[in-house]
Image (cartoon, grey):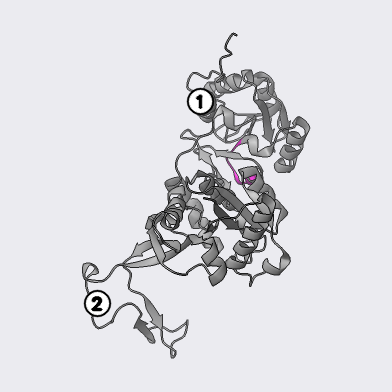
Amino acid sequence: MTVLAVIPARGGSKGVPAKNLAPVGGVPLVVRAVRACLAARRVTDVVVSTDDAAIADAARSAGAEVVLRPAAIAGDTATSEAAVLHAMDAYGAMRGKTAEVVLLVQCTSPFITAEDLDGVAGAVTEDGADSALTVAPTHGFIWRRDSAGSADAGASGGYGVNHDKSNRPRRQDRPQEYLETGAAYAMRAEGFREANHRFFGHTALVTTDPARVLEIDDPHDLARARALAPLLDPAVLPTYDDIDAVVLDFDGTQTDDKVFVDSDGREMVAVHRGDGLGIAALRRSELKLLILSTEQNPVVAARARKLQVPVLHGIDRKDVALKQWCDEHGIAPERVLYVGNDVNDLPCFGLVGWPVAVASAHDAVRAAARAVTTTPGGEGAIREIAAWILGPGLQTPHTPTLNK
């Protein structure tokens, strides 16, 4: 059975510009959705429907097929149903097969899981439902303003929606209610075409963890998602097979961000010998290395010479320099691990596949990182990262060659 997951991800967004490419936990929202779909056991095909070239590139790099959405169904008033129907037809024409079940997956729900997707898909493919959606149990009392009230009204104009305000039974005495999460829906394809909407026939409710329910509609939602990501995302650290290059900031990552200045204006910094050991091990591997710094300081070049690592310093636009370096060396940015600590590293975080923050990094940098060290900058953070990649013994992983 073909179970097609469709992720609508248009380029326009007024609440959060370029929302579908906004990183949460160091990973763009559209990529998070693609990864969840690819990890779901019951999903056989994954398509991203978009009108935006950058979103299309990110989706393809993550492993999804891309359907380019026409402008007629890409505006502010376009429905998700229209995007899904178009994607079903386009994908059928591209691949020559018809989906029996289709999923609508919203990448603005950053904490959707493969289990959620398998749940809604299984409700249709195995349990006999015609449509299904993810819901979260709720015990809240819902209120609404009456017609005499206003959004600015203080104490007047309110009435209970799911309760009688004169009689508020205990939670255990009320029927269980469910909140639609907006994250995932599954439909029998034929019924969806006939009904032209996502709820038809027998609709199954698939419960999910309320703690993971969050829809990103405005910058405050995005900030909450980034704060929650370190708590809700499974800990995933990069391995040797995940990357082709390691790019290191200097101040605040290889140092503790302090500078000692003598009476003649000469600057000195403290570095960690463990970091030198880790960098030496990375250098012996086949990974490309680079030190990238905005500081035009002899100490940066001197440390790079000691480590035998190429350096670019005195750089105003680190992301531009990094992209040019990747192009010159034939390295895909999504295969780069970049280590940083401050806000001037954020453009590079948006470019690479593995943005890593040291434990002492600025809050905004930690929130945008895909992984965060337990060690502060200048105290062995680079040694810790080298151990992620090469293992505790700092030996390059390799596959033994069998003699024939």
x, y percent for residue 350: 64, 46
The type of residue carrying mark 1 is: Ala
Q: In the image, 269: left or right of 1?
A: right
The front one of 335 and 283 is 335
Which residue has dot 1 on it? 387
Q: Which image quadrant is residue 79 in?
A: bottom right
Q: Which residue shows up at 62% across the image and 46% down it?
A: 346
**Quadrant assignment for the C terminus:** top right
For this orientation, the residue located farthest to the bottom is 148
Read off the residue under disc 2. 168
**Percent position of residue 4, x then y:** 56, 53
Mark 2 or 1, nearer chain start: 2
Expressed as whole percent of the image width and height from the top left, the position of residue 155 reads 37, 84
The disc label shown at residue 29, or none: none
Q: Range of the magenta residues?
A: 338-346
Any part of residue 286 in sight: yes
Q: Are marks 2 and 1 in contact (CB under 8 Å)?
A: no
Q: Image height check: is 92 above or below 329?
A: below
37 above or below 174? above
Q: Can you give x and y, in whole percent of width and height, for residue 198 in the image?
A: 51, 67
